[in-house]
Image (cartoon, coloured by chain):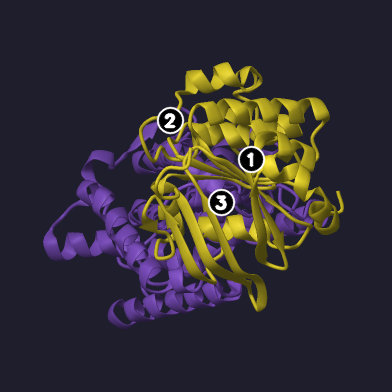
Amino acid sequence: MTSAAPLLTVGGLNAWYGEGHALHGVDLEVFSGETVTLLGRNGVGKTTTLRAIMGLIRKRTGRIAFDGKDLMRLPLHRTAHQGIGFVPEERGIFATLTVDENLLLPPVVAEGGMSVEEIFDLFPNLKERRNSPGTRLSGGEQQMLAIARMLRTGVKMLLLDEPTEGLAPVIVQRIGALLATLKKRGMTILLVEQNFRFASRVADRFYLMEHGKVVAGFPVGELPDRMTQLHEVLGV
Amino acid sequence: MTMIFGIPVQAFLGQLLVGLINGSFYAMLSLGLAVIFGLLRVINFAHGAQYMLGAFVGYLLLTHLGIGYWPALILAPLIVGVFGIVIERLALSRLYELDPLYGLLFTFGLALVLEGIFRYYYGVSGNPYAVPPLLAGGTNLGFMLLPNYRGWVVVASLIVCFGTWALIEKTRLGSYLRAATENPRLVQAFGVNVPLLLTLTYGLGSALAGLAGILAAPIYQVSPLMGSDLIIVVFAVVVVGGMGSILGAIVTGYMLGLAEGLTKVFYPEASNLVVFVIMAIVLLVRPAGLFGRDA
């Protein structure tokens, strides 16, 4: 799976919220087709890392390259067009838009995305409720919609921020199955996840973050040997 | 003579028609304000001046270039819309990151400057603008004589209001607009050029004001102060309807126009006040406005 150059390279990334220095030199790489999970306690900068990669945080220094292109210079609305889809922690479903409109909102950025029919095959619940306001959906359905609307756009990589947060175990399982399906289709995923058991099932590799930095990176195979360290850092 | 509540039916319907005409302008203007406020979070105090500008563009096209009403009906909103786009690019777009008060103060200043310029060259007395020949005269409805032009204004404003509503509620562009009203950063992160959307929205809002202006030219006179006379009532309409609500702006515009007309029949002294009395009551009972979502 490790092709020559990583799809996403982040080097020495610093980011600020106003005066607050949130990231202190994050380094990570994600290769095409991989699912990589950022682990770490609350407030260590996992969400900030995703938002800085996406360009939602403008006060940032360092290097972010995607598919050989420098993302640092792009205005916010050009980042998605390089092939990155963002699924925010709060899901970002629009209340004044129907399910259909929410699904069709993100512009198609490349060929090879799913058709609306394929998406509805994958998410039959959404089809049934396509004319309801987006926020009338249950939490799980909203999460499905937040992911589903990115699949239409033809992006190569998804940035998923805590997709299982606050969801019932049965829904978490369905999201796990969905990520496996996406992986089979060749989707590259960078995941932020508090649910360690969920993350350990879906990820190929992990990065562990502390104090706005990546402190360790290891493949899923090393997980058993790392449990002591993870216990210390995460308290799992 | 037929009477309604002790009032001759002609007088009653006549005032109702005046109310409907005024309501048409309230609706078109508050609609533009609502569209701009919804997305840009700018209270566009220049809206009245842009309405005045629309009327003056029509007047100047006629007096200087001999271009008549019908072409002006297209050109005036277009020119005012482009003017709005330039203003947004040059100035307003630089104020978004600041406190909303800056946008308000800027547009307020812009309105004063525009009115000042036109007052300098054209004075405060109005300039007449003739009703286009096609719409001259009136139609006898049996119970009253309806001036054709006024009938046209009501129809035109209904078309404009419905068209704008459909654009926002029923099209892809409209869904971008609604989504960006809720969460502009996320919509931009999805790859939509939100800065461009803001520019076009301000242009659209300005064009709506310009269109209302050219429609108003044959009814009211073309005067530098025509905008500031109207804009205060229009702001009351927006407050009653609920800030940023498209449907609210339209319905409330017509409703308050009619309420004004009715008051003129029964208690003429209060007709200028009634809009503000309604505003005060609505603010007491439902501070978010009749159609506003509670924050």
* Pointer 3 chain: B
Give the answer, above or below, for where A120 lies relative to A210: above
Q: Which chain is yellow?
A: A
Check disc 3 and give the amino acid type.
Answer: Leu
Q: Left or right: where does residue A148 sit relative to residue A208? A: left
> Observer-nearest residue: A203 or A72?
A203
Check disc 1 and give the amino acid type.
Answer: Ile
Q: Position of residue A36 (x, y in %)?
A: 60, 45
> CA separation, marks 2 and 3?
20 Å
Task: In the displayed orientation, state which residue is furthest to the front.
Answer: A225
Check disc 2 and give the amino acid type.
Answer: Gly
Which numbered disc, 2 or 3, marks the residue closer to the eye? 2
Residue bearing mark 2: A113
Residue at 48%, 73% (x, y): give it. B107
Q: Residues within 10 Å of mark 2 (few under 14, many from 20)?
A: some
> Observer-nearest residue: A69 or B188?
A69
Q: Colour of chain B?
A: purple
Mark earlier in primary sequence (2, 1): 1
Is residue B267 among what the camera can see?
Answer: yes
Quarter of the image for the N terminus of chain B: give it.
top right
**Element under label 1?**
loop
Q: Are marks 2 and 3 on the same chain?
A: no
Give the answer, above or below, for where B277 lies relative to A195: below
Q: Position of residue B228 (x, y in %)?
A: 49, 69
Whether pointer 2 and pointer 3 mark residues with C-beta atoms closer than 8 Å, the reply is: no
> CA separation, marks 3 and 1?
10 Å
**Element under label 2?**
loop
* Pointer 2 chain: A
Q: Which mark is residue A93?
A: 1
